[in-house]
Image: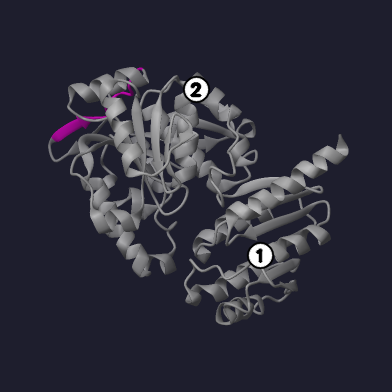
Amino acid sequence: MSATEVGRQVLPAPPLPKSVPSWIDGLRRAGAQPVIAVAGSRGKSTVIHLLDAILSAAGVRSVLWTDHGVTIQGRKQRGELVPWTRGMSLIASGGLDLAIQELDWDTVAAVGLPQGAYPLVAVTNLCANNDACLLQEETLRAVRALRSIRAAAHPDARLVLNGDDWAVAGGDNEADPRNILVTQSRDTPLVRSHLQHGGMAAWVEDGAVRFGSNPDPAPLFALANAPITGGGGFGFQVANLLTAVGIARACGVESTTLARAIEAYRPDPMALPGSFNLFHVRGATAIVDLPTQPWFMRVPLRAVGHLAATRQVHVIGAALPVPISDLPETGRLLGRGGGLLVMHGEKEHPERAAAIMQGVAQNDLPPVIIHAESESAAITAVLRVLRPDDALYIVADDANTVIRRLQRAENAERASIA
């Protein structure tokens, strides 16, 4: 029997529930509410929406609370606290089955969490083992918030943790057999040790997702059949996918249902604006993302760089959520490899534009730069010069508006072909 040793006491890894209803019944007998918490610096909303699609395919009725608001059985609600309270009441009365709640670092740090409340907690990442990230004040707040989140887990809770991020899965978490680790490779030191001690993990091997505690479980599904991962080429989306898989298996979703739901899942850009939204316009691949610190921007840029594209085209404005001290590195990343860079908002924020340009100039082969008055003008300029086989990466100040522009362009192209 799989187990880990704590002092002289041997604690066996608990078995997975046979189904979601049996998991919920067990929680109620233990006096716990069926609420799944998802925390992390990036990827939380993507994980939650993918998980909701998996649970829906399993016949589960859910209420979601993300930074985009509250959704009950797929329907966006007005307000947040009132519909969330209504959703929890429906769970108590049997009108809904479970809740999924996104936990934001700053909100947790500001208002705290109830102790021992969550029977299932997932953490997507902290800062991907980046030393510069670990020194930031916001990261220190996130570390404090992570401690609060762990304290808010039920005594018998499972934690689904990023096994590639030591700040998330290392330290005190290493010896807990209830944890489920997710990783790009089972040879990651934390995951290898976890599996050797009987823990469970989700990982990628030979182009397929695998899950279990033994070293050679049957594949659940091929990454090529998971559209959200771009056939496995979008590494950060693979990590999000693995987290959703870990949560789904932890609450009893059967593997065949899970695989079928993932293969059918297509993210709605308007439900997750700026979360690596993917479009195809004039033969080019266009991606809309939100401004973020350089250590996180490297990950989607790496995915864009792996696209079969003849030219990289990048668009950026003021990127207000990014500290100005990080903008030179942002500019350096966006300016790598030449291509085309479209900048806007320079009149309103000249100091931020100068910081980005400082970084762009560090590249041996800087891009051609186009200056636009506004984000709308920048998108117009890009659509005029976009070539087939370009890879377009837009760091959007107003993701909703940019998405609508690209959707119109995509639909107009389809109509012209028809």
The residue stretch that appears in magenta:
9-18
User: Which is more toward the observer, 191 or 304?
Assistant: 304
Asked if 291 appears above or below 266 in the picture, the reply is below
Q: Is residue 387 magenta?
A: no
Asked if residue 216 can be seen in this view, the reply is no
Mark 2: secondary structure? helix
The structure residue drawn at horizontal position 50% and vertical position 30%, both measured from the top left corner, is: 53
Q: Amino acid at mark 2?
A: Ala
Indicate the quadrant where residue 340 lies: bottom right
Res 375 label: 1
Secondary structure beneath dot 1 equals helix
Q: Nearer the viewer, mark 2 or mark 1?
A: 1
Instruction: Decide which of 145, 225 is in the foreground and name it.
Output: 145
Q: Is residue 12 magenta?
A: yes
Q: Point out residue 346 in the picture as x, y percentages from the top left corner.
A: 63, 77
Q: Could you tell me residue 244's position as x and y percent?
A: 45, 36
Q: Distance from label 2 to label 1 (Cα)?
A: 39 Å
Q: Measuring 35% from the left and 17% from the top, which residue is drawn there? A: 18
